Image (cartoon, helix red, strand yellow):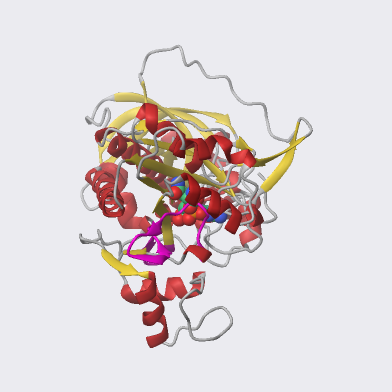
Amino acid sequence: NPSLPKPVRIRLDVTDPAIIKLRAPESDEPGTRVRVLGRVHRLRSQKDVIFITLSDGYGFLQCILMGDLVKTYDAMTLTLETSIAIHGEMRAVPPKQHAPNNRELHADFFTVIGRAAGDKEAITNRVSADSDPQTLYNNRHLVLRGETSSAVMKVRAATLRAFRRTFEETKMLEVTPPSMVQTQVEGGSTLFSFDYYGEAAYLTQSSQLYLETCLASLGDVFCICPSFRAEKSLTRRHLSEYTHIEAELDFITFDDLLEHLEEVISRVIGYLLEDEQIAQYVKELNPDFKVPQRPFKRMRYSDAIDWLKEHDIPNEEGQPHQFGDDIAEAAERKMTDIINQPIFLTHFPAEIKAFYMKKDPQDPRVTESVDVLMPGVGEIVGGSCRIDDWDELIAAYKREEMDPSPYYWYTDQRKYGTSPHGGYGLGLERFLAWICGRYTVRECCLYPRFTGRCTP
Ligand code: 4AD
């Protein structure tokens, strides 16, 4: 904007007083002289004093301007989001007054670095339920400056750390499969396709098939990569691009898989909540969050069908549910909300699941498959044991009318020392929507991609 003045150059090489980041409790000792750099997050002007809540992405600091400082042009025209350097002295907050981390900075000097236009206040600081969602998505870059969005992003980063820590402890190796592929995993209808040097290629729906090929030489593996789904409908839990946490384990039974999943989810929640700052964010975002009790409830698909019938929750055609029906999002969510605890929903019929799932030896109508359902969101994990027999896999391609040739490298695993194995994929944004109590997964990623939105 040409009407905005040029930013002031500030000397970052000057060492006195020291620049501090607003992580608590750094240089909090009353009397310490410091320099802070950040943006005006809140502003309250009185006749002789200006209160600024400064934010630098690490934390908040109440800064107080008094005396001659208040009478300057810069102070009188200060706007929210203006970036600023303030020099001053740390003080304890007077009794009965409140400030973040119970500290404040009494300024003796400040410089405006980059003035903010002052027209988008409502977006960053006062996002209300009645704000138009499209306006919020268009201004996501500013919405992210708000306390709610930034708290979710911090919980997200902590969740990624917690998963990596858990996988490290369980001796699983991180790999990075490609995003550009020539095979589908979860059905052709949600594939994003593109031209790859004259050949058809897709954005990956899941890295599962690649993870399976790693077992022989790397042992149990995981990846945290984007997955892409050309979802046609707008729902609150479907994105076109999401962060997929996937794992694959060798030489396991279906029970091993369920136990591993319960252990991983429980440890991740434990690590999140043992961090005081993260626990505080979770509490503010989702005051009702309850750590799930172990063991998690296990329910077979056929029992879920009975449950839905008994509770008069119809299928998508408005008819009572029957064996073989896909349990649609609305029904699944209703059931999860009523039961109100995590559910391991297992043993789905082969016809409604992906081609690679292993049949249950006790009941070949169903597969060794699991969806993990969480209150408020529904499915956050999909997993299964994989077909490990060559003939059975070939028959599965045929059943699904898939050409087996592009899958030669996947099929080969059954030819060169096959093994009973299985794994799962967890949608990070859905996990976060559950933990942080968000209405939609769109609030749980930096810049959501969904039907019709690829900006900013
Ligand atoms: O159930 P899905 O489709 O399973 C797979 O992709 C397996 N191949 C994973 C594996 O076994 N390695 O997806 C797994 C999870 C879902 O439970 C959900 O949390 C998330 O991925 N997910 C989505 N999240 C956001 N937007 C979408 N469009 C999603 N589709 C799936």
Near-viewer residue (108 or 334): 334
The picture places residue 61, in percent across and down from the top left corner, at 36, 39
Quadrant of the rendered image containing residue 179: top right
- Taking the spot 67% from the left edge, 52% from the top edge, the residue there is 453
Q: Quadrant of the C terminus?
A: top right
Position of 369 relative to 408 (above/below): below
Q: Is residue 6 magenta?
A: no
Q: Inspect this view and state whether residue 136 appears.
A: yes
The picture places residue 188, in percent across and down from the top left corner, at 64, 53
Please identify the residue farthest to the right as the structure is shown.
198
The picture places residue 286, in percent across and down from the top left corner, at 35, 60
Near-viewer residue (56 or 133): 133
Near-viewer residue (386 or 173): 386
Start-end of magenta stretch: 352-378
Q: Is residue 339 left or right of residue 224?
A: left
Position of 238 relative to 192 (above/below): below
Q: Inspect this view and state whether residue 146 appears.
A: no
- Taking the spot 48% from the left edge, 63% from the top edge, the residue there is 350
Quadrant of the rendered image containing residue 251: top left
- Taking the spot 62% from the left edge, 37% from the top edge, the residue there is 181
Q: Quadrant of the N terminus?
A: top right
Q: Is residue 374 magenta?
A: yes
Quadrant of the rendered image containing residue 212: top left
The picture places residue 56, in percent across and down from the top left corner, at 44, 35
- Taking the spot 25% from the left edge, 52% from the top edge, the residue there is 259
Please identify the residue farthest to the front as the structure is shown.
391
Image label count = 0
